[in-house]
Amino acid sequence: MVVSDIDLRLLRVFCAVVEAGGFSNAQALLNVSQSTISTQMSQLEARLGVTLCHRGRGGFKLTEQGEACYRNTLDLFKSVHAFQRQSDELRGASSGVLRLGFLDNIITDLSSPVRSIFHDFLHRSGNRTRLALEVLAPQDMERRLLDRRLDAALGIFHSTLPSLTYMPLYREKDSLVCAREHPLAALSDRQALREAIQTAPKVVRSFLETLEFSDPDLYAGQANVAVVNIEAAAYLILCGSYIGFLPQHYARPWIERGDMAELLPDEFEHYSDFSLVVQASGAKSAALQSFLESVALVQQTSARAQTSLAG
């Protein structure tokens, strides 16, 4: 089979369907209808001469040939990316596309250096790089870094993988909050509130596992719910059925309006460590090298400012 531009487009659709877990879930990723996706998948199967997946009442499932095709497709796109990077290097300047993944809802954090990093990088002399930004969960960022579909990622990572390099970037402060109509919001007795926090149903970020509530007693027998992103956590907390940690900068508008209440902020103080992650091995593109230089420069500037204030 001679691979054409159309085949590459169909293979990207195939990858999106696999990663979304089915045709229906892939609609949002691809911004096309389910019938269009079905047609494209049928075209790809006809081109390859094999059945890639089963779809129907039993759900979406790859065939043995489909699993092999998915692995081969990832290898193909790795090679395409390597070719693009090497072609960019021949131009002798920072160019091409730099693909970055990051967590949702960090833009309102004034202590975050991310905006300064982007500003420095994009205004570097001779920089013709285009940024491709994706909001992803930490586990998705790591998977795409391993597959070389991302060049770098910014997020909170509970554990580390040996094939990736994790560089500490900054800390985000979290507050334990509940909705104003939640029973805990009206408790003024500290001991009673402390005991009520232990038994209250909680919303937690799945990628932090037990880090948000480090005391095992806080998890005992609770109807906790796990979410991937901050917005989902905020919705559940505002419904009045759950308590949970939210970044202070994100929760501030609701707290100031009285829609949320902080719970024992002097006791339940939590910090989330953000890291910048890249592949541990392999050549780095000129664009990525330039981006890492911007990261180092902003960190150095911040460290000097903190030293000056301390002095």
Image: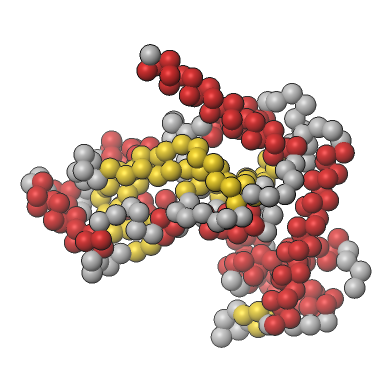
Image position, residue 305 (x, y; %): 46, 19
Image position, residue 272 (x, y; %): 40, 44
Residue situated in front as seen by the camera: 32 or 282: 282
Indicate the quadrant containing the C terminus: top left, top right, bottom left or bottom right.
top left
Q: Count up the numbered dots.
A: 0
Query: Splitting the image into 4 quarters, where does residue 266 fall?
Result: top left
Q: Residue at x 69, y 76 (%)?
A: 67
Residue situated in front as seen by the camera: 19 or 40: 19
Q: Residue at x 21, y 61 (%)?
A: 217
Residue 162 falls left or right of residue 98: left
The extreme right residue here reads: 2
The extreme bottom residue here reads: 58
Rendered view: 272 above or below 64: above
Report whether residue 242 is seen. no
Query: Splitting the image into 4 quarters, where does residue 41 fall?
Result: bottom right
Indicate the quadrant containing the N terminus: top left, top right, bottom left or bottom right.
bottom right
Report whether residue 148 is seen. yes
What colour scheme has been applied to the protein in the rendered image?
secondary structure
Q: Residue at x 39, y 16 (%)?
A: 309
Image position, residue 167 (x, y; %): 54, 41
Residue 68 falls left or right of residue 242: right
Image position, residue 283 (x, y; %): 74, 45
Q: Residue at x 19, y 58 (%)?
A: 198
